[in-house]
């Protein structure tokens, strides 16, 4: 899951300052009928004894992604979507139980939320990536990726295909969102900023709701 910056993307400069992102108006979310039986699984990566990536200043992936995931779940629930979280606090859950939960609840979509990392000697590597495995996952990934970039000022590292366990073994459209690099000079302060986390959550939720609308899933 770690990107090393050697994939042909251009180098980026490290800014001398990293101000908080400017406040933005709450996004206008597509409406989903309250009687929808839609089920979306939100999967905050890592947890408990598994901190995930550890970045600048000891920033831990598991806490960042849990905060973002809870906010995504809250937004979706407000829009009438039934949300199941693979974890809702700081405990460990392995990969297969995450997949099995999604299958057991007959989820329509599976969205795994992570934060990326590379060596602490590479603070120049920053940016946002979204991963998919299946063709259905590609459509979901593109929708979420574009929605996030409309809300969050972020370096675009693209939509990419990968064989992550939770993407290969889920039967519904599934994506893995890499919200930024905990080792990045630009990303780490943002990932640790509650206001920025809220923007990221809003973008992810917006993308999920757009996908639901575009694919008429609310009518199932």
Image: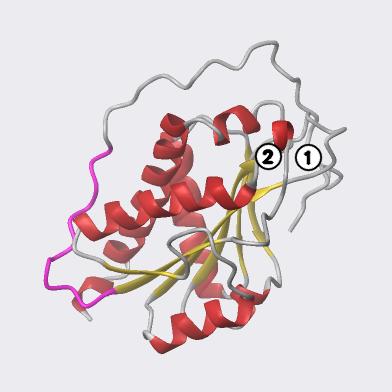
Question: What residue is rendered at 28% in x and 73% in y?
Answer: 217
Question: What residue is rendered at 70% in x and 67% in y?
Answer: 162
The answer to whether one can see residue 170 in this image is: no
Locate residue 63, reporting x and y percent: 55, 48
The answer to whether one can see residue 187 in this image is: yes
Question: What residue is rendered at 56% in x and 30% in y?
Answer: 190
In the rendered image, which quarter is residue 105 located in?
bottom left
Q: Which residue in the protein does label 1 denote?
A: 9
Q: Earlier in the sequence, mark 2 or mark 1?
A: 1
Indicate the secondary structure of the residue bearing disc 2.
loop
Q: Which residue in the protein does label 2 denote?
A: 182
In the rendered image, which quarter is residue 156 located in?
top right
Indicate the secondary structure of the residue bearing disc 1.
loop
Mark 2 or 1: in front is 2
Query: Which quarter shows the C terminus?
Result: bottom left
Magenta-highlighted residues: 27-38
| Measured Cα–Cα span from mark 2 to mark 1 | 19 Å
Asked if residue 34 is among those painted magenta in the image, a careful observer would answer yes
Estimate how packed mark 2 is, as few (under 14), some (14 to 19) or many (20 or more) residues with alpha carbons within 10 Å: many
Locate residue 192, reporting x and y percent: 55, 33
């Amino acid at each position: 899951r770690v990107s090393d910056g050697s994939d042909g993307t251009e180098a980026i400069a490290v800014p001398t300052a990293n101000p908080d992102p400017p406040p933005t108006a709450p996004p206008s979310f597509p409406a989903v009928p309250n009687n929808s039986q839609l089920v979306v699984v939100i999967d905050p990566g890592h947890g408990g004894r598994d901190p995930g990536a550890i970045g600048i200043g000891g920033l831990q992936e598991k806490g960042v992604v849990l905060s973002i995931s809870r906010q995504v779940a809250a937004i979706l629930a407000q829009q009438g979507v039934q949300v199941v979280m693979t974890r809702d606090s700081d405990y460990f859950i392995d990969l297969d139980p995450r997949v099995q939960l999604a299958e057991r609840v007959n989820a329509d979509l599976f969205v795994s939320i992570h934060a990326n990392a590379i060596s602490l000697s590479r603070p120049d590597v920053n940016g946002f990536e979204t991963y998919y495995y299946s063709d259905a996952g590609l459509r979901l990934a593109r929708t979420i990726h574009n929605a996030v970039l409309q809300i969050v000022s972020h370096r675009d590292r693209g939509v990419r295909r990968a064989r992550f366990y939770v993407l290969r073994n889920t039967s519904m459209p599934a994506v893995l969102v890499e919200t930024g690099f905990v080792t990045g000079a630009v990303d780490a302060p943002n990932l640790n900023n509650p206001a920025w986390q809220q923007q990221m959550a809003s973008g992810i939720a917006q993308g999920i709701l757009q996908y639901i609308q575009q694919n008429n899933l609310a009518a199932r």
